[in-house]
Image (cartoon, rainbow, N blue to C red):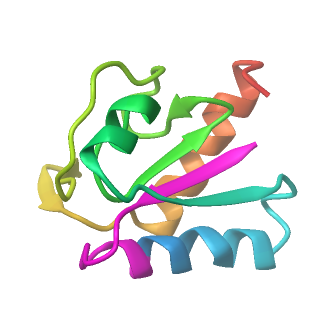
């Protein structure tokens, strides 16, 4: 299963979700995508929320490739090809899901 976690007001959530959904539309993703609005710091703690936006594949954060520990309630910044961004690019999402599938986390 894939979880997309975000909070309202995060400027990067919509574009990241659009990138994720386009992979589903193209047939790369067949799994259900569960969209979770993390509405409070309490909910963030309960989910081990890593920041908005976060994509989990079978419980693994596709950025860190690990199960989340701890939590934060902030907009998330990723370093992709040595550049900071708040948006996960479509190709990055695709590559990380492919790696996690191959590692039998599926």
Q: Is residue 88 left or right of residue 79?
A: right
Quarter residue 44 falls in: top left
Residue 47 position within the rendered picture, expressed as x and y whole percent measured from the top left: 45, 34
Asked if residue 105 is positioned above or below residue 25 in the image, the reply reads: above
- On whether residue 75 falls in the magenta region, the answer is no
> Which residue is more in the foreground, 27 or 13?
13
Task: Locate residue 73, reporting x and y percent.
Answer: 21, 48
Q: State the image coordinates of residue 39 (x, y, percent, origin top left).
A: 37, 59
Residue at 31%, 57% (x, y): give it.
52
- The magenta stretch spans which residues? 1-15
Q: Is residue 98 above or below residue 55?
A: above
**Quadrant location of the C terminus in the rendered image:** top right
Residue at image position (39%, 43%) is: 43
In the rendered structure, does residue 6 fall within the stretch colored magenta? yes
Task: Point out the image quarter for the N terminus.
Answer: top right
Q: How many marks?
A: 0
- Residue 69 placement (x, y as % from top left): 35, 18
Q: Quadrant of residue 49?
A: top left
Instruction: Say which residue appears at 43% left-offset and 31% top-offset.
Output: 46
Side (left or right) of 95 relative to 104: left
Nearest to the observer: residue 100 or residue 21: 21
Residue 75 image-quadrant placement: bottom left
> Which residue appears at 76% of the width and 70% of the height?
24
């Amino acid at each position: 299963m894939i979880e997309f976690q975000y909070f309202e007001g995060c400027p990067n959530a919509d574009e990241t979700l659009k990138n994720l959904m386009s992979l589903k539309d193209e047939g790369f993703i067949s799994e259900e995508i569960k969209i979770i609005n993390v509405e409070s710091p309490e909910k963030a703690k309960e989910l081990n929320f890593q920041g908005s936006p976060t994509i989990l594949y079978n419980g693994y954060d596709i950025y860190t490739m690990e199960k989340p520990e701890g939590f934060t309630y902030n907009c998330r910044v990723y370093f992709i090809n040595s550049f900071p961004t708040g948006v996960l690019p479509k190709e990055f999402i695709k590559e990380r899901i492919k790696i996690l599938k191959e590692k039998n986390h599926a």
